[in-house]
Amino acid sequence: GLGTFFETGLGACGVSNVDTDYIVAVSEALFDSYTETSPGNPNTNVLCNRPISITYNGVTVQATITDRCAGCAGFGDLDMTPSLFTNFAAESVGRIFGVDWVFV
């Protein structure tokens, strides 16, 4: 998928994050395909706080899902915090293509 980065704040999972946290927003399509334990409340989506392992260009880093990305077009796209993104590329790159990730 595609990897980008964003400035954090209060995410769809109800968690306030900072740019140094290793967290991601998954695509809206993926996030919304999973159920909420309390219907209509995204904070209770089963993906919230789920750990993942991200690999790009031979580098693998663990992160946690805490948000949904409305601007992510691909089902497997990830929006990362700046500190997480810079494990894979400089912020000046903006977008990285060919990001793989799995649930752990």
Image (spheres, rainbow, N blue to C red):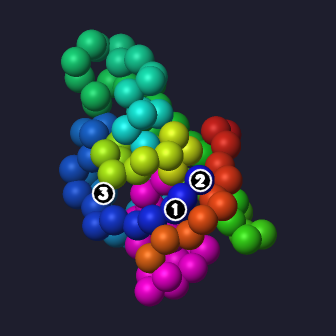
Looking at marks 3 and 1 on the same chain, the residue that comes earlier in the sequence is marked by: 1
The answer to the question of whether label 3 and label 1 lie on touching residues, with beta carbons closer than 8 A, is no
The residue carrying pointer 3 sits among few (fewer than 14), some (14 to 19) or many (20 or more) residues within 10 Å by Cα, namely some
x and y, in percent, of residue 59 in the image = 72, 69
Whether residue 66 appears in this view of the structure is no
SS for dot 2 = loop
Q: In whole angstroms, how far apart are the C-alphas of marks 1 and 2?
A: 7 Å
Query: Which residue does the image show at 67% across and 53% down from the upper left?
Result: 100
In the drawing, does residue 88 fall left or right of residue 86? right
Q: Which mark is residue 73?
A: none
Query: Which residue does the image show at 35% across and 43% down from the upper left?
Result: 68
Which residue in the rendered view is the most extreme toward the front? 73
Looking at marks 3 and 2 on the same chain, the residue that comes earlier in the sequence is marked by: 2
Quadrant the C terminus occupies: top right
Location of residue 44 with respect to 62 vertically, above or below: above
The answer to the question of whether label 1 and label 2 lie on touching residues, with beta carbons closer than 8 A, is yes
Of circles 3 and 1, the one toward us is: 1
Q: In whole angstroms, how far apart are the C-alphas of marks 3 and 1?
A: 18 Å
The answer to the question of whether label 3 and label 2 lie on touching residues, with beta carbons closer than 8 A, is no
The residue pinned by badge 2 equals 1
The residue pinned by badge 1 equals 3
Of 7 and 50, nearer the camera is 7
The residue pinned by badge 3 equals 17
Amino acid type at image mark 1: Gly
Query: Which residue does the image show at 41% across and 72% down from the upper left?
Result: 82
Amino acid type at image mark 3: Asn
Q: What stretch is highlighted in magenta?
A: 78-93
